[in-house]
Amino acid sequence: MPRLLAKRSELTIARRRLRRLMNSYGPETAVVFSHVKTKTFLDSTGYLPRADGPLLIGQHHSQFESLVDEPSLREALPLHFGDIDAFTTLTDEDAHKFEHLIPAPCFGVANPLQAGWTPSFASRPNKAVALARFSHEKQLDLMVRAFARATAAPDLSEWTLDIYGSGKEEGRIRSAIEASGSQGRIRLMGPTTSPETVYRQAAITLSSSNLEGFGLTILEAAACGTPSLAFDCSPGVRSLIRPDTGLLVRPLTEEAYAQALRGALSDPDRLAQMGRAASERAQQFSPDRIVDRWGAILSEAERQHSRRFSSAG
């Protein structure tokens, strides 16, 4: 009971501080809510948008279809983002879908490429890599099984797969590696603090996620000249992988993934060509371009803010 009372007191103080902070902002400030939960908490403070107040911009960092698995989120988005000035998601395609849910201008704006990364076109070893959270939607156990199946033929038996990351699914992934009989060729490497080095040492990057709003690892790999193979699971992934820059797998099945992977690993020259094209495509997501996009979004948010309060007045 004392802890509960203390927590309630802390929340009360936090709400008062947040409300004061928001009321101190003028129209030269934009407040970006990276998740609807942050806007939900602001609403609980009693704060009300005002004509001379800041611009309010909401965001959703996954594909529109993710709302199917989160009905409470689908309900919260129009409820708490009903008074914002702009809304952003990761692609124009997703933004168009959210227009029917969010009563504000919706924009697609991608995550930016890491500044300073450059491609390398040196000869690569027969190595595939994956960088991911060890969570259910990443389906890394499927990746393990598909890789083992794809490289079962003698001519592909020298290929290896290094998986970087950590998470609650590690036991499941280890079991899949043991069951595949490929313990010597598939390794769990733990987290890495140097992803750029990892990408440069691989001929291909693998993603087996069935829920991926954008796929930053795909973009990072492309910046290093490394193509990716991924499930065609979202507009964000499709925006990063074109036929000449990587491979998209549809249908989203283990067998289709194994077949596509077998074909990719059988043609190292094609992988190298894709890597070069991927590095060129990655420049479309340079920080300068993303900043320019945000400039356009802020300008439209300012116009929306003026229209909304002029109408209310």
Image (spheres, rainbow, N blue to C red):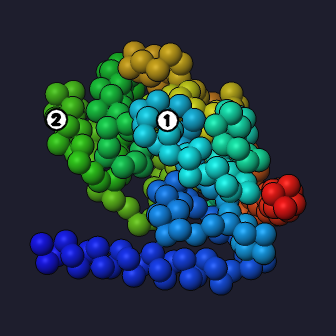
- In the shown orientation, is residue 174 left or right of residue 30? left
* Quadrant holding the C terminus: bottom right
Q: Identify the image quadrant of residue 177.
A: top left
Residue at horizontal 46 percent and vertical 20 percent from the top:
252
Checking the image for residue 175, the label placed there is 2
53 relative to 166 in the view: left or right:
right
Secondary structure of the residue carrying numbered label 2:
helix
Earlier sequence position, callout 1 versus callout 2: 1
Q: Residue 137 at x, y = what percent?
A: 37, 36
Residue 288 location in percent, x, y? 78, 64
Number of the front mark, 1 or 2? 1
Quadrant location of residue 243?
top right
Point 64% across, 37% down: residue: 101
Q: What amino acid is at disc 1?
A: Leu
Please provide percent x and percent y for residue 127: 42, 42
Residue plotted at (68% across, 51% down)? 87
Pick whichever, 267 or 302, lies toward us: 302
Relative to 259, is 242 on the left or the right? right
Q: Which residue is mark 1?
A: 67
Residue 236 pos. (x, y %): 62, 39
In terms of image quadrants, where is residue 307?
bottom right
Q: CA distance from mark 1 to mark 2?
A: 31 Å
